[in-house]
Amino acid sequence: MGRSKSNGFVLAATEETHNGHGPVKKTPPQTQEVTVDKIELGTLRRSITLVGAVAILIANIGGIGIFITPTMILRFSGSPGLSILIWLLGGIVQAAYAFCTVEIALMFNKAGGPYFYIYSSFGDMAGFVYMWGFVIFIVGPSWALGSYTASLYTLSVIFTDCQPSDFLVKLVALWLMVTLMALNSTYMKVITSIQSILTSCKVIALAIIIVSGLIYVPTETGQENLGSFMDESTTNIGNIALGLFAGSYGFGGWQVITVLAEEVKDPVRNIPRSLGFTFAVLIVVMVATNFAYYVVLSKSEALKSEAVAMLFGQRIHPVIPLIMSVLVSLCAIGNLNVLIMGQPRVLFAAGRNGHMPRIMTMLHKTYHTPWPATWTLGVVASYLLLTGSVMSLVAAISLYFGASAILLTVSIFVLRWKHPDKHRPFRIPTAVPIVVFVIMTVILFMSIYEKPWTLVSNLITILLGIPIYVIVFKCERVKKHLNFMSRIGYYLEKAFLLQYES
């Protein structure tokens, strides 16, 4: 692919441009983008309104975590009361972290979210390592967990008297994932309108749980459970840290709105407002939902299954489990839809900066959506879906969220130092990122202390991105073998009506 920084990966400072067959003309060495002949250059469309942004955030923040992670947090905390406090603190920390990121998001207003911010702050290697970890520990596990949960709850409507086989659950999950990938590749406007309907299912399910729990408070069982709310609370700092990790996961996922920054209408106004409104509502709702769980269920009952919403429904009324199955399955589909909508844009941004093959920046000429990025991530997610477990997926996601939060809070100060005069439509008070950094660092190291082998192995996997970066980007012999990327891009362009981004 001519003499570029890394043949098929990086296009900055390119000396020659190509049409898929070979060099066609010279450009100055200082040129930062390659001109591609004989195509109509594309851009991402701004189609997400304030209402659409709120719907996306409500569907994605915590995902379906409120229906499966309370049991995990209860195990770590030892008591319902402490687990509720962990949920509250997790929500506050994530809200503060989100607004720290808004400062950078509105400063750049580019697709890519946290990846782009870390790359801009710390350079090429940090950007590549983040992307390496993002694909392995965020995209794959998130899509796999979302599709598996949607499939499990969907099949529970059909298999009322028995548990569906794991093979069937994963087969249906794979079908759901591929279907949503196809829809997101073709009809973004339709899929965003459907998202509002899917989001309402989460709202209805949570409303049923909260109202039922409040009605249950005056009962004898409710009073008995309230009387033992703080019994057996753990004093183990490591377990509390692991609980906070899981609690932070319960409020994670807001990053999708920064990933979609280039597609949000009036982002300076709509991104902060949508985040503020969503967190204000969801922190109250999540705490109230957990309170309702533990008013109805005793600690021993809640620990029987990860599907705590189903146990809750069985105690309230025989019809409630069926209703909850339908609502949670639709909610999980909505969550998966948001992930598939937003996360390929990170790979798209990595392709811009040369940390992924340039074909990841290709958009469809008609639909203006990143087809190669979407389907590449789909392959990774499908593999993890077929080979992973729920607990391992949640652990991987939580660890990476924590490490990313530490890097991003540091990047705020790095960017203020590197670009002191750059316009910032939104500026977070300095104390906020400092507090977030301290809290997330303590949680990360205490979690590693409590479960060293599991978390350290994940950290080692992330750090493997460093030698891979050196081999791919610095080794001339390896770079010569990457010329086939330009040929693949040429055939994809012709076969699927794709074009490179402008």
Image (tube, rainbow, N blue to C red):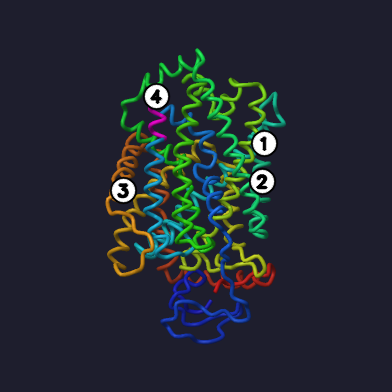
Separation (CA) of disc 3 from disc 4: 26 Å
Circle 2 Cα neighbour tier, 10 Å, few/some/many (<14 / 14–19 / ≥20): some
Which residue, given by chain and number where applicable, does mark 2 sit on? 176
Q: Nearer the viewer, residue 46 or 489?
A: 46
Q: Nearer the viewer, residue 327 or 380?
A: 327
Disc 3 or 1, which lies upstream in sequence? 1
In this rendering, position of residue 413 left or right of residue 220? left
Mark identifier at residue 437: 3
Which residue, given by chain and number where applicable, does mark 1 sit on? 154
Amino acid, disc 3: Phe
Separation (CA) of disc 1 from disc 2: 11 Å
Disc 3 or 2, which lies upstream in sequence? 2
Amino acid, disc 4: Gly
Disc 2 or 4, which lies upstream in sequence? 4
Which residue, given by chain and number where applicable, does mark 4 sit on? 78
Q: Can you give x and y, in whole percent of width and height, for residue 214 in the image?
A: 51, 25
Separation (CA) of disc 1 from disc 4: 31 Å
Q: Can you give x and y, in whole percent of width and height, for residue 215 in the image?
A: 54, 22
Most extreme residue toward the top is: 220
Most extreme residue toward the right is: 158
Residues at circles 1 and 2 in contact by the CB criterion of under 8 Å:
yes
Amino acid, disc 2: Leu
Q: What element carries label 1?
A: helix
Magenta span of residues: 79-87
